[in-house]
Image (cartoon, helix red, strand yellow):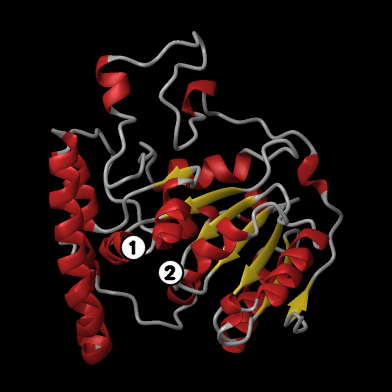
Amino acid sequence: MAAAVGKRNVKPLWRKAFSSPFPESVVLTSDTTTDPNHGEPYRGVERRLRVPVLGMRFRDLDENGAAQYMLQTPRSADEGLCVFVTPNIQHIALARKDDEFNRALASAQIIVADGFPVYRFAKLRGLSLPGRVAGRAVIERMFADPAALAGHRGFFVVDSRATAEGIECWLNDFAPAFAVETLVPPFGFEKDAAYCRSLADAISTFDATLIFLCIGAPKSELFAYRYRALLPPAWALCVGQSFRLLLGMNAPPPDLMVRLNLEWLWRIVLEPRRMLQRYGPSTIGFLRAAVADLRQSR
């Protein structure tokens, strides 16, 4: 196990009860189709809102709702690890070819539509969603108020030492009551089961309540899925480059492009070769998945 870039030891106050503003009816796992209050299947609109789209049951949470729910709803030992994912067209295309990744996405407790095509397709299928929910925006809401982080313990699995040091430096000043540990896994770590088990053990030993997996898809989702039994009762957020954007390490798209849902064009401008190689196959894979989903829903 490679040494973490840094950590701060704060007593694990997270197990004290948080008061949640959300009604119990909001607490739906990704496979819930039965009303928890009456033990009978949902019907009509209530069931339609929970019907799988592209193999997943999307939650009707907006960015702030998702952030606050995870901050204010600690996981119990019986509940175990809960996962937050933000599928875009790349996720959908990869899931068509990889059954394990498909299961990892479908089993997440909070699934929100990040990519605009995914969101529009979910709306076409009849889901009533508040809008796109980008991982970057959820992270911005979670870290808007340092007081909301007090008592939590955050473990960050990131892509580079520069990212780790940036997070450490920022949070030392911004949220001193938030316990932090960062770790940069070696390239190809996901193929080394022994290393992955030791990483899961390090996260569990740290007693993390929030696990930020910032190593891209499908690595983040597969790690949480494969080693969930070894990980602590916590929220695992698969949020890619969100912290690099938040810290200004990656150039964010202009506000106008965000409003017009053209972030993909901004990424192509910054990295034309890499992004075109990604978006071409992802677009084709997403369209095929959408057609298959429409046929299956008839």
Disc 2 on helix, strand or loop?
Answer: loop
Which amino acid is tagged 2?
Answer: Ala
Q: On the rendered structure, is 149 left or right of 243?
A: right
Give the mark nearer the N terminus: 1 vs 2. Answer: 1
Residue tagged by mark 2? 217
Task: Tell me whether circle 1 and circle 2 mark residues in contact (CB < 8 Å).
Answer: yes
Q: On the rendered structure, is 28 left or right of 57?
A: right
Q: Name the residue at the top extreme.
A: 38
Residue at image x 39%, y 15%? 41
Disc 1 on helix, strand or loop?
Answer: helix
Residue at image x 56%, y 66%? 213
Expressed as whole percent of the image width and height from the top left, the position of residue 167 reads: 61, 75
Residue tagged by mark 1? 91
Q: Residue 61 appears in which quarter of the rendering? A: top left
How many numbered dots are placed on residues in this image? 2
Residue at image x 43%, y 69%? 217
Question: Is residue 5 in view?
Answer: yes
Expressed as whole percent of the image width and height from the top left, the position of residue 197 reads: 72, 68
Residue 217, above or below 227? below
Mark 2 crowdedness (10 Å alpha carbons): few <14, some 14-19, many ≥20: some
Which amino acid is tagged 1?
Answer: His
Q: Observer-nearest residue: 206 or 221?
A: 221
- Image quarter where the N terminus lies is bottom right
Residue 133, above or below 162? above
Q: Observer-nearest residue: 201 or 210?
A: 201
Mark 1 crowdedness (10 Å alpha carbons): few <14, some 14-19, many ≥20: many
Residue 113, above or below 186? above
State the mark number for residue 76.
none
Residue at image x 17%, y 49%? 292
